[in-house]
Amino acid sequence: MNQSDEHTNRQWRLRSRPVGMVRTSDFECVEEPLPALGDNQVLVRNLYLAFEPAMRGWLNDVKSYVPPVGIGEVMRASSVGQVIESRHPSYAVGDLVSGMLGWQEYALADGEPGPMGRLATVPDGIAPEVMLSALGGTGLTAYFGMTDIGEVREGDTVLVSGAAGATGSVAAQIARLRGAERVVGIAGGPEKCQWLTEQAGLDAAIDYKSENLARRLRDELPHGASLFFDNVGGPILDEALLNMAQGGRVVLCGGISGYNEEELPPGPRNYMQIVIRRLTVRGFILIDHFKDAGRALGDLSGWLSEGQLAVATDVQEGFENTPQTLLRLFEGKNLGKQLLKLADPPIPR
């Protein structure tokens, strides 16, 4: 009997478009029989789901770099899973694979490239948690944002917001590894700030929740930041603009502070600092850099193997907790990459 004859598939689908803060009730859990496997397809048992702030934007019915998730569709998400059936020559039963397989226990995939990349085989010795963090989309985003967009260089003074998140934590360490003279992170809470200085090797970390951000920025960056990597936007971006060096660079990676607002917040009050300080401001999207993924993965995996890159993950458990795990990102509960473990590999490796 095939694996698919023995199981039904639970899925979390989008029930309604969020208004303001995303809610667990915006999703519904459904159960259906597994579909039949076609030619050049594989059936994957999802083991881990990954969560990122960008998922909130995918729920809005607006034009973006990828189509919005449709009402009634399985929620889009990257995952690591195990191939349990295969009719594709490139994938064998038992292989661990990573791809955009969504909020479901099982997924059919054809191995062909899509708008968010293609199904990739997880290299031997790489844990699922690392494949979905430092070697996944957030790690690649950090790499290209810091190296190709920010053009970090020796002697830079670098400021990173959202520095204890999945992307920010890697970006800040890349700045250090690429020779930045000083790297300062902004995060929420003493535990996160302690991790940044003691594990990630940052020169300083500012707790925006309990400290005077404006004063700390002036103290830690007396000559201003030559490079600011922003994952947050809002008031933190405003304060950073007042603490940039002349001719500095600003990388706009994300704006989590405003993702759940019912109305778009006003733009930066201090935007004229861009003119006054002659700043260069650039935004970017990871999918534009997929062609160079090999270079990024080579550097990231090298730093990991040499013990130069610390990786933090927050792993929750249980398929029933999928929507609530997404909310953790916007409640500031995660340190590093937010993951959800669904199962152990069903086929021994």
Image: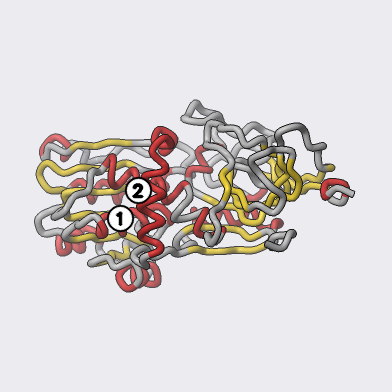
Q: Quick one: quadrant of the C terminus?
A: bottom right
Residue 274 x/y as whole percent: 17, 37
- The front one of 140 and 164 is 140
Which residue is depicted at the point 17% across and 63% down? Answer: 220
Quick one: SS at disc 1?
helix
Binning the other alpha carbons within 10 Å of mark 1 as few (below 14), some (14 to 19) or many (20 upward) gives many
**Does the residue at mark 2 contact the one at mark 1 (Cβ under 8 Å)?**
yes
Residue under pointer 2: 143
Q: Is residue 314 left or right of residue 247?
A: right
Quick one: SS at disc 2?
A: helix
Residue 131, numbered circle: none
- Identified at 56% across, 52% down, the residue is 122
Q: Nearer the viewer, residue 327 or 202?
A: 202
For badge 2, the amino acid type reads Tyr
Q: Amino acid at mark 1?
A: Ile
Residue that badge 1 annotates: 174
Is 272 left, or right, of 133 in this rendering?
left
Badge 2 or badge 1: first in the primary sequence: 2
Q: Residue at x 74, y 38 (%)?
A: 87
